Image (cartoon, helix red, strand yellow):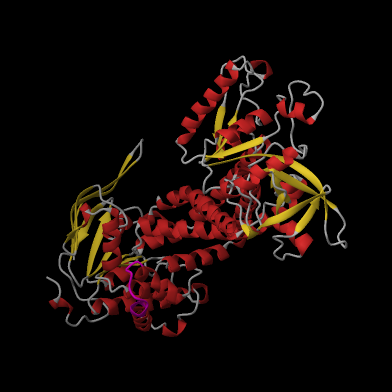
Amino acid sequence: MFSYYFSLAVRSLKRNPVITALMVAAIALGIGATMTVFTVFHVMSGDPIPSKSSRLFVPQIDNWGPKSHRDGDNDPADQLTYTDATALMRAHQGVRQAAMYAAGFSLTPENKDIKPFFVEARATYGDFFPMFETPFLFGQGWSNTEDEAKAAVVVLSKKTNDKLFAGINSVGKSINLDGRDYRVIGVLDAWEPAPRFYDVTGKTFGDTEEVFIPFTHAIEQQIGSHGNNSCNDDPKAGWDNYLVSECVWIQFWIELPSAADATRYSAWLDNYAREQQRLGRFTWEPNNRVRDVQAWMVAEKVVPNDAKVSVLLAFSFLLVCLINTIGLMLAKFLGRSGEIGLRRALGANKAALFAQCIVESGVIGLAGGLIGVALTALGLVGIRGIFPEDVAHLAHLNVGLILLTVALAVVATVLAGLYPTFRAMQVQPAWQLKSN
Amino acid sequence: MLKMTRLEKVYRTHLIETHALRSIDIHVREGEFVAVTGPSGSGKTTFLNIAGLLETLTGGQYMLDGVDASKLDDNARSKLRNEKIGFIFQSFNLIPDLNIFDNIDVPLRYRRMSAAERKGRIDGALARVGLASRMKHYPSELSGGQQQRVAIARALAGSPRLLLADEPTGNLDSLMARGVMELLEEINRQGTTIIMVTHDPELAARAQRNIHIMDGQVTDLDEQPRLRSSTPMPDKNTHVA
C-alpha cells in the first residue's frame, strides 16, 4: 500500500502547486537554517576521540590557592606548572601519560629550493601518539628511551612531509629547526581531531602541529612555550627560574585503565597536593579536578554560548516554519474532506487514511529535506563570514549529515502532519458525501 | 439481506435532541430492488447512511447479511462496507484527479487484492457499464450519465451483495436517467440487492417494493415485492420470500 499512498501523495501535491510550494519552502528554509547552524555546533561539540574519551583525563591542581579565584569560580588553573607536570610524569599513575606544550620553530629544509618557513610544534612525550591514537603514514613515534635520552628526533605531520619530501617516506632523514638537526622517526597520516582537544588553551579548532619533538629535549634546549602562559607572580629571569615558578603553561593528559579509575587517580592527586602542603608550597586544602575529554570540553567552554544560542534560534525558526506548515496542511487535508469521506465510504478504515495522510506529510518533508540539503550547503559557505575560519572550514556536508538533514525534515514534517491528519480522521463520511 | 428492528437514530447537541429515525422496522430480502421515498428531511438519507454503515445507530438492531452490524467497531464496519456494500451517489463522487480506472480501483485497493485481480475486476465492471474504452479518461472528460456509470462500475467492481443508491438520477437529464435506471435494473436482475432513495415517484414505481418514510418513521411499506412497472422480471420471484 505504501507505493499506492506515495503515488496518491505526489498526485495530491501536484493538484495544489502553490500550497505545495509554500509547504516545501517552509520546511526547506527551516531545515536549511537549522542544519547549517547544527553542523557547525556538531563540529564544535563532537567527541574528538570517541574510542577512549572516557578513559583520557586532564588533572588540574590548584597551585595558586583561594586568593586567585574570582566570581565564585573555584576551579583550579587549566594548565600545570613544570614542577607539577614532571612530578605527575614521574609518578606514572596511568597506562600512558604525556605532558606537553606548544612551541614554534623556523624550519630550514635540506632542499635549498624551499625557503625556510615557520612551523607550529608540540613538545610532548612518546605516549602522546599511542594515547591519542594518532595515525602513522611512515615510521612511528618515539619511545620512553628517547624521552629519557632527550633525543633530537621529530615526527612530522603529513602536510609537512608532503611539503619537505614530496610525500615520500622521510624516516631517517633530517630536518633543521631553529639551527638544530632532528632525525625524522615518523610521519603522521592526516590527523585533525575536532576540537583539538589536547590543547584548547590556544587554538581550539584547526590543523594539528606540523612537527612533534620530545618534551625532555625541548626543556633541555630551553625551547620556550608558544602557547598560553599564566603566572600569578613574577617568575624572575632565567629558564631555571621559569621552570620552578608557579607559572602554568603545560598541558597534561593521562590515560587510565577505565573510567572508574578516575576516583583512584583523584585521591592520588589529593595526596600529592597534601604532600605539597607539608612541603610548604601550598597553604590550602587540596582543590584538584580530574576531568575526562567531554567534561574537559565543557569546562573549557569549547562550544561558546553564542553557538548554543544560535542552535536554539535555528530550532525556533524551524518550529515557526513547522507551525506554518501545520496550518497549510490543515487547510489542505480538510479541503479534501469530500475525498476522505468518499474513501471511508468505499471501505478505507481510519488507519488506512491515517497512513495516506502521513505518507503525504512525509513526501512534503522529503521534498523539503532535499531542498534543505542544498540550502544547508549554501549556508555552510555563508557561515564563513560569521564563524571563525578554522571552525567554518571543518563544517561541511557529508553523507551522514545529508541523511540526517533529510531524516529530520521527514520526521519533523510527519510530526507536524499529525494534527492535520487527526483532524482529517474526524471527517464524518456521511455528511461529506451528502454535502458533495 | 438487511433487517432493521426498532432502529433509532438520534442526533444530540448540548441543546437539542433530533430524532432522525424512530423505531424503524425494515426487512429487505436478498435480490430485492427497494425504493425508499419520502419528503426532504424525512430521514431517508439517514436510513441509507445507517444501512451503508456510514453512521452508527442510537438504538435497536441492524443485521446485515447475518452480521449484527450494531455491535461492530469502526474497523469491522469498514471491512464489511468494503466487501458487501456498493454506493452510488447523486453527485457521482468520483475523485477528479484520478482517471476512470483508478477511480474504480479505490475500493479494491482497500481489499489488498493483487494487481492482476484488480485489473480483471475493473475491466469487467467497465465492460458491464459500457465504458471499457474510457478507462484512461478523467471524470471531467465524461458526461454526467457516463460519470454515474463509472460510479456504478466502481460499486460493482467489488461484487457487493447490496447496492445503496442515493438519488442516482438526481443530477441527470431524463435520457441519461433512463439509461442509469435500466443499468440498475439489469444489475438487480443479475442478483444484487438494491436499495434506492428517490424523490421521483416514476423511478420508485419501477422498484419491486416501496418504503415510505415520514418524520423518521416508516409510514407506508409494501410487504411483498411486485413486478416492475416497465420491465419484466423473469426468475426474480424465486429469490424473494
| Of the pair A74 and A328, the residue shown nearer to us | A74
Q: Is B171 in the magenta? A: no
Percent of width and height locating residue A422: 43, 49
In the image, taking residue A408 as reference, residue B135 lies left or right, namely left
> Visible in this render: residue B37?
no
The residue under the point 60% across, 60% down is A370
> Visible in this render: residue B181?
yes
| Of the pair A1 and A99, the residue shown nearer to us | A99
Is residue B26 positioned above or below B16 on the image? below
The residue under the point 53% across, 24% down is A270
Residue sitting farthest toward the front: A149
Is residue A51 positioned above or below B151 on the image? above
On-image quarter of the C terminus of chain A: bottom left
In the image, taking residue A103 as reference, residue B179 lies left or right, namely left
In the image, taking residue A31 as reference, residue A213 lies left or right, namely right
Is residue B76 positioned above or below A144 on the image? below
The residue under the point 72% across, 62% down is A170
On-image quarter of the N terminus of chain A: bottom left
Percent of width and height locating residue A230: 73, 28
Is residue B109 positioned above or below A373 on the image? below
Q: Is B114 in the magenta? A: yes
Percent of width and height locating residue A380: 70, 53
Q: Quadrant of residue A228?
A: top right
Residue range in magenta is: B110-118
The residue under the point 69% across, 60% down is A171
| Of the pair A356 and B179, the residue shown nearer to us | A356
